[in-house]
């Protein structure tokens, strides 16, 4: 007998042979003849099961509109290397601890970590820098609101504009048409301005572990293609013979990154 039937009220039935004597209603739950009476613990379990079945389904994630599904989330962590050292740790250790915790709680999840870079002395809260770097819509909207309608980034003077926040390079106002990997290569050099980067470091930081690692010769090919697209400004990427490559800023080179620093692969 199902739970629904056992808990339903029982109708009063009158016997045809004694119409003047109404049958008394059955107050106890029905059970099969010969079955033992339910114990107090059984009744409590039944009540809990009935309550659980009536409980509404878990609500959807608040920010997820109808017709879409949540596939993950972003946790912004704002802390620079000096603060991490003062706390007795490093950014790498924080990342690894968060990854380990995620793997423990949800083994089927995947993680990706990036570090947000900003010019030294840029100021502002660390977490705000990270949100802008990762193009958080709310942070970008707040920034635009603070700037009003003024937007100087759409002016294209002569020279080179390396717009890290928008992932583009303009040469005298015209887009250079760099590929994704070419821009990543240029960005890596720009963010380390004045330092010579060897080919091994470029391979290690610009190619994922899952990708087939290119040879040092491949790096030379990428740099050569990048420089050809920079046209008469190609000498901003200098070759240091026997070592690697370096970005040298000229007077006609403008780098836009302070408002929305680009994340770099951690």
Image (tube, rainbow, N blue to C red):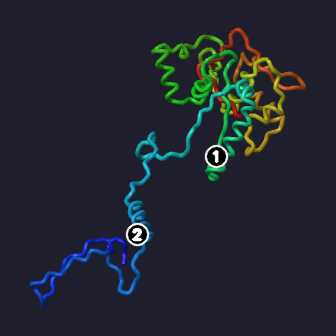
Q: Position of residue 248 (x, y in %)?
A: 77, 16
Q: Residue 51 is drawn in which quadrant?
A: bottom left
Q: Which mark is residue 120?
A: none
Q: Which quadrant is the N terminus positioned in? A: bottom left
Q: Is residue 24 visible?
A: yes
Above or below, 58 against 76 in this view is below
Write the residue at 73% across / 14% down. Answer: 249
Q: Which quadrant is the C terminus positioned in? A: top right
Q: Is residue 168 visible?
A: no
Q: Position of residue 214 (x, y in %)?
A: 79, 39
Give neighbour class at mark 1: few <14, some 14-19, many 20+ (Cα, 10 Å).
some
Q: Position of residue 68 (x, y in %)?
A: 45, 45
In this image, 152 relative to 67: left or right? right
Give neighbour class at mark 2: few <14, some 14-19, many 20+ (Cα, 10 Å).
few
- State the SS at label 1: helix
Q: Which residue is mark 1?
A: 102
Q: Which residue is mark 2?
A: 43
Of callouts 2 and 1, which one flags the residue occurring earlier in the amino acid sequence? 2
Q: Residue furthest left?
A: 20
Q: Residue furthest top?
A: 251
* Front position among marks 2 and 1: 2
In this image, 107 relative to 63: left or right? right
In this image, 160 relative to 205: left or right? left
Write the residue at 71% across / 19% down. Answer: 231
Above or below, 109 against 258 in this view is below
Q: Residue furthest bottom?
A: 17
In this image, 8 relative to 52: left or right? left
Above or below, 101 against 81 in this view is below
Compare residues 146 and 252 and report the one nearer the observer: 146
């Amino acid at each position: 007998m199902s739970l629904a039937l056992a808990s339903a009220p029982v109708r009063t039935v009158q016997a045809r042979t004694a119409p003047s004597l109404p049958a008394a209603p059955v107050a106890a739950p029905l059970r099969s003849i010969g079955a033992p009476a339910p114990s107090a613990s059984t009744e409590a379990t039944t009540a809990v099961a009935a309550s659980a079945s009536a409980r509404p389904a878990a609500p959807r994630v608040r920010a997820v509109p109808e017709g879409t599904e949540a596939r993950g989330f972003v946790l912004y962590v704002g802390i620079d290397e000096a603060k991490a050292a003062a706390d007795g740790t490093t950014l790498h250790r924080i990342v690894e601890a968060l990854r380990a915790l995620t793997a423990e709680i949800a083994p089927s999840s995947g993680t990706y970590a990036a570090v947000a870079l900003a010019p030294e002395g840029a100021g502002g809260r660390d977490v705000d820098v990270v949100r802008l770097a990762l193009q958080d819509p709310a942070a970008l909207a707040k920034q635009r609101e603070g700037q009003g309608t003024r937007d100087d980034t759409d002016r294209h003077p002569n020279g080179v504009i390396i717009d890290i926040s928008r992932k583009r390079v303009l040469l005298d106002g015209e887009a250079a048409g760099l590929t994704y990997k070419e821009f990543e290569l240029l960005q890596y050099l720009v963010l380390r301005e004045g330092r010579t980067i060897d080919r091994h470091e470029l391979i290690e930081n610009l190619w994922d572990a899952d990708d087939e690692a290119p040879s040092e010769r491949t790096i030379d090919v990428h740099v050569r293609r990048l420089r050809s697209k920079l046209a008469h400004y190609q000498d901003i990427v200098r070759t240091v013979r026997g070592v690697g490559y370096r970005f040298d800023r000229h007077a006609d080179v403008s780098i836009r990154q302070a408002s929305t620093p680009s994340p770099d692969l951690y």
